[in-house]
Image (tube, rainbow, N blue to C red):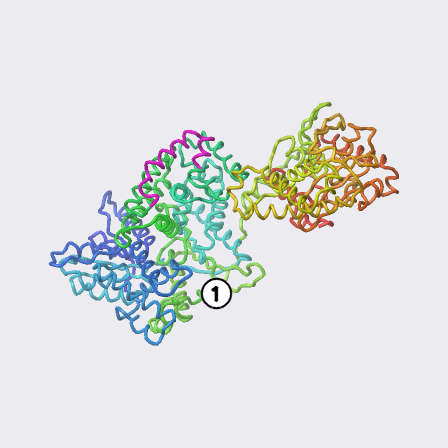
Amino acid sequence: MTSVTPAFFEALAGGAGAVTPNRRLARQLQRSFDREQARAGRRAWRTPSILPYATWLELLWRRRSEQADHRAPRSLLTPTQSAQLWRRVVEAGSTPLFDAQGAADLAGKAWSVVHSWGESREPWRAWDEGHTGDDPAMFARWARSYARLLARERRIDAAQLADAVAEELASDALRDTHALFVGFVRTTPQQQRLIEALPRRGARIELIAAPSHPRPVARRTLAATPRDELLAALTWARESSLADPEASIGIVIEDLAQRRDEAVALADEVLCPQLCLPALLGAPRPYEISLGIALAQVPLLTSALGLIGLSLAPLPVAEAAALLRSSYLPDAEASTASRASIEREWLERGLNEIAVDDAIGTLIAHADALGQRWRSGLATALSDVRRGSATPREWVDAWRAWLAQAGWPGSTPLDSAEYQAREAWDDLLSDFVRLGVVSPRLRRNEALDLLRTLARERVFQPEGTDAPIQIMGTLEGSGLVFDALWVAGLSADRWPKAPDPNPLIPIAWQRERDVPQSSAANALDFARALTEGFAAAAAEVVFSSSTRIDDYVRAPSALLQDYPEDRIAQRTPLWTTVMSAGGALERIDDNHAPVLESGTDVRGGAWIVEAQSECPFRAAATHRLGVRPWPKAPAGLSHPERGRILHETMAALWRKLHDHAGLMALSPKALETCIEQAVEEGCAALAESRWRLLPRAVRDGESRRLRAVVAKWLDIERVRPAFAVSTIEGDAAIGLAGLRFRLRVDRVDALADGGAAIIDYKSGTQETTKSWFRDRPCGSQLGMYALAQRESQPVVPIRAVLYAKLRADEIAPVGIALDPLAWPTLATADARRFPTWSAMEAWWRRSLGGLAADIARGWAAVDPRNPLPCRYCGLQALCRIDSVRHPDDEEGEDE
């Protein structure tokens, strides 16, 4: 086996073709060839044939189809067709499976292993004997079915292609063929059979060792954590590139698939921080990362899949809202803000899923032109296929028409990466059409699921650039040559990798043939070969590992022990650290909203005073700025909805009963009927359109719960002294600190022996009466109601104020009574602190008046009281309190 030398490039120039194990090595050899030709003084030259192995095989098979043969060659299935055929076979099997798609993927890989590493074409025939019920036996049955389908239709797949080429390609098709196999760490038995067969048909085959650097120097180093290791590698790459802008630099990351997002974020931070600005997000980077993302995750195609999915089945609210906000819809810049408000509307309506008709109706209200366009497109593009089955071609034609009618991909020109993604989308749809070979007709759900699966499984990688820094996984980096190379993540627990044999193939069979990753010895040999290849791939090679991950201590791989250890260079601080320390920061305490003029009617009623006590910022944001927390669509009724139903129920009930005498006069049956009618009126407070979104069981369950709660509360009301309900959901007002607060009081009772009792219904938790009189009081609504009642009827004494706690698990009055005759079960006020009821009212006026004065002067500091109201506030994105406190700070003494 020879190595890459000038003679290799001369052979390419003379018409030989190179075959590589991966696409990245093919690209590097192409660039190296071009540089050699330029150094030789040539201004133009013929592009050589440098192809990945799989592409080269397909090229040879196309030559087979051009042969003058009385028998037409078998047709070659695409990988997509093969995967779909495996899924059909697995789903048709007698054994029910939880994940048929996963089993089909595993079976397809086992099929490839069997053909690549086996001597016999059908070794699985023996696995079905004596293995009934185990995984190899199940694979044997699948393999027989799959092989029969291929034979019946005269087809082959990629796993069989090399053997088919070796057997069926005639010598005239290989005349003048000179193939140079470059960079194969190890050839499979199937590849070896091909390499031996082709020369007998006139081809010339040479094995070329992977390129290597003439004077490599390798060393190893340690970092504290995996993140520090990546930062050190990127900092080293940046400094190497600055020292020699023409140098090619590689960074190999052992677990790149799991750490791709982290690697990209840190690479942007270290290598090109200036490109973090929104206007430069699409600018070329000085690095290229080998591992792409799923086609379904590319924003352009996420919107296309969303449009298709929405047209055929409801989408979750978040996905539907993201689709409407997409910049790949018409007039995105002009209408995105309006379309962004749609999600809040859906959530407030309690929607969890959005059908296309709902989306169109809402769009017409917010962006009429787009809504009308969707309505027209849905009627014309998908009318023939939405309700039945269709061929893959019919599905693709309908999807293309719908996307065009819907306005995808928008009116903004696509950049280079987006254009490539659009081409990848067209290729995906073309592959979907070809599925007609193995799946002639597909139902709606089948077609949609299959399209989404293909988009998730297909990796999108924009065309490679000539960026000086290349970030790769271990297999992508194998066989490449750089001026400098860093290999990260080689800890003892990761390198060599743990064995990972295919569970559908007998372990003994795999180990006998030394299938990769089938045994620890095999994994060690493979890792050793890759390590030695990396050590010879650059003038400067650095191997690294981290000493700790979380609380787990790690050791470097034993394969690195022969390389000298070097201390890791001190990494340069990140640009964010440098910028934040680069100058004095100015501090501005912006704790005040505009002052309110005397006599102002304050929005928010009693709730703004309660919010001012909880957190001044919350009061200003909610009641003065009109900020609302982002809603969440509940699984059933929301807490506000249940509270509204409760209040309407209690109001309807006492409009019928009127007073204590009316309650006592009803028979049990009549009272039950009265409660049922009140509950029905309470439920009617919610629009019927809202109830239609919920299962009938929710309404029935809420009605039963309310009937039980109301009945238990009336048992408490029965033992009270006589009273008459004088006010139901009544309006009131009070002046404090020059401001006017408008209130809505749930209920006021006129007591038979004089005075009034104020009742506020609560379905949630309530604070104890002790908390009403803290420096920052809780439950200030009752104090506001008492002061308003005193202001409107100064001669009528207030003898009780209370919450009616109406929870299924606790039904009780919580409040304070002037004397036991007002409400026997309520406690009286603390005589030492409030010797008279007037003293308690005076305290309320001072305390609540102070809060009102704070509102008037615009006091809006972020200062939550204890226990913290932040758990249910929902405005943290605005106040940013979580950015300056530790989560443990939320644990208050009253937790």
Dot 1: few (<14), some (14–19), or many (≥20) neighbours within 10 Å? some
Residue identified by numbered label 1: 557
Residue 353 in view here = yes
Left or right of residue 164: residue 484 = right
Image position of 153 with respect to 430: above or below: below
Image position of 378 with respect to 542: above or below: above
List x then y, in percent, for residue 384: 31, 41
Q: Nearer the viewer, residue 459 or 520?
A: 459
Q: Secondary structure at mark 1?
A: loop
The residue at the point 61 percent across, 32 percent down is: 626
Which region is colored magenta?
359-387
Type of amino acid under label 1: Ser
Q: Is residue 381 magenta?
A: yes
Image position of 487 with respect to 269: above or below: below
Q: Main secondary structure of the magenta part?
A: helix
Q: Is residue 221 magenta?
A: no
Residue 857 in view here = no
Q: Nearer the viewer, residue 180 or 703?
A: 703
User: Based on the displayed image, in which of its 4 quarters is residue 283 positioned?
Assistant: top left
List x then y, in percent, for residue 605: 69, 31
List x then y, in percent, for residue 166: 20, 63
Q: Nearer the viewer, residue 491 or 159?
A: 159
> How many numbered callouts?
1
Q: Residue furthest bottom?
A: 130
Quadrant where the N terminus sits is: bottom left
List x then y, in percent, for residue 296: 40, 47
